[in-house]
Image: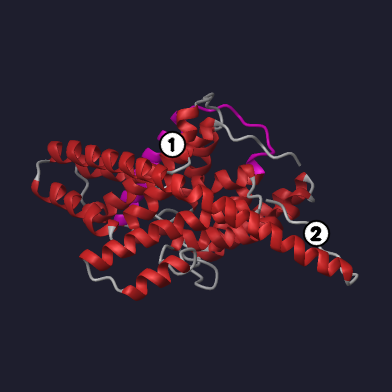
Amino acid sequence: MTAKVRQSNFELLRILCMLGVVTNHVLQTCYPQLHTSDFSIANDLRVLLMCMSITAVNCFVMISGYFRIRQSWKSFFNLYTQCAFWMLVLTTLSYLFLDGTMMDIGKKTIFSLTGSGYWFMIAYFALFLFAPILNIAFEHQNSRQRILSLIGLILIDVYIGYMHQAPEVTIDGYSALHFFVIYYLGMYLSTVPNIKMGGVKWLSFSVIMVVMHAIKILFPPFAIIFSMRYNSPAVMIASVLYFKWTMTWKIQSKSINWISASVLAVYIIHMGPFGSHYFFVPLKYMSAEWSEGYACIGMISYVMLFYVCCIMLDKGRIFICKPINNWLTSQSVYIMKKIDSVLIQKGLHCRSYKK
């Protein structure tokens, strides 16, 4: 199968998804009344925004499935050095100005992909490791087998995991297994003809989700159909509608691609040991002390400024890490080739390693 060339519409989706992640975290942190019987217009609008942004994580992972994760030393070190760099910076700042420790600096930097405390990074790294198996399985299946596999995966993730709340699987989608399912769904969507649809269907369904949210508050058993969890049936449907809408966008922009390369830094910084403390403090103050209108304007401006600053800071990180990535990649390939040559001399077969 020929790898797809990345398109700016999906890069824009990646940017919007990360903005959605930040928005969802802001809403959940600053407005505890979101999950109460407050049915005021202001709170309903916040719930609508939450319903629109809750699809962000699913769509972000779906993009990886659509284009396929291709394991290589270069892609691994690009991911690792980005996480390690920011964990080094954030844990050092936490040590200097908060209650961080020297142990945190070493542990969370070296084991940034598995020991940082970021559930998303741990699940995504597991997906990175497992993706070749999913790719091979998918590429060797016919259309009927792909549909049956997708149905089976959704039954495990949504029916057993979410609807029956089986902790052995996943109860809320915060797991590698859910990422495997969403990744496979992204692969499947890449092979079927896209039905042109506008954002009206996604927006309409988001409004319906607000109604479902209200029903859940008044009638809690309805949560079996809808809740703000990544693997709830309604969120899964909304994620597909949003993703399929973005598939129809006709955009090509170097600026969008340039911004998209740094969106992961936004997640790491605003959820980090130092960033999370100082990022949410001004937002909590605005939501609590300012009037509704001023708080809305202030919080939007603050989030957008923070987003832009993170992108610009990460460009400095790229400048620093790029030569390090290239050196680590070349050394790893060299070592693997040496191992290959030794194994071949002993009559053992080993595949060649790509950069």
Residue at (47%, 43%) from the top-left corner?
Answer: 238
Magenta-span inclusion, residue 207 = yes
In the image, 320: left or right of 331? left
Q: Give the label on residue 285, or none.
A: none
Q: Give the label on residue 351, or none.
A: 2
Residue tagged by mark 1?
A: 259
* Image position, residue 268 (x, y; %): 39, 55
* Image position, residue 326 (x, y; %): 58, 50
- Look at the image and tell me in which quarter the N terminus lies: top right
Q: Work out whether residue 250 or residue 37 is closer to the camera in this orientation and state it.
A: 250
Q: What span is colored magenta in the figure?
A: 188-217
Query: Whole-Å distance between the Cαs marked 2 and 1?
Result: 36 Å
The secondary element bearing badge 1 is classed as helix
* Image position, residue 120 (x, y; %): 46, 59
Helix, strand or loop for the magenta stretch, by majority: helix
Q: Work out whether residue 28 or residue 277 is closer to the camera in this orientation and state it.
A: 277
Amino acid type at image mark 2: Arg
Q: Is residue 93 above or below residue 304?
A: below
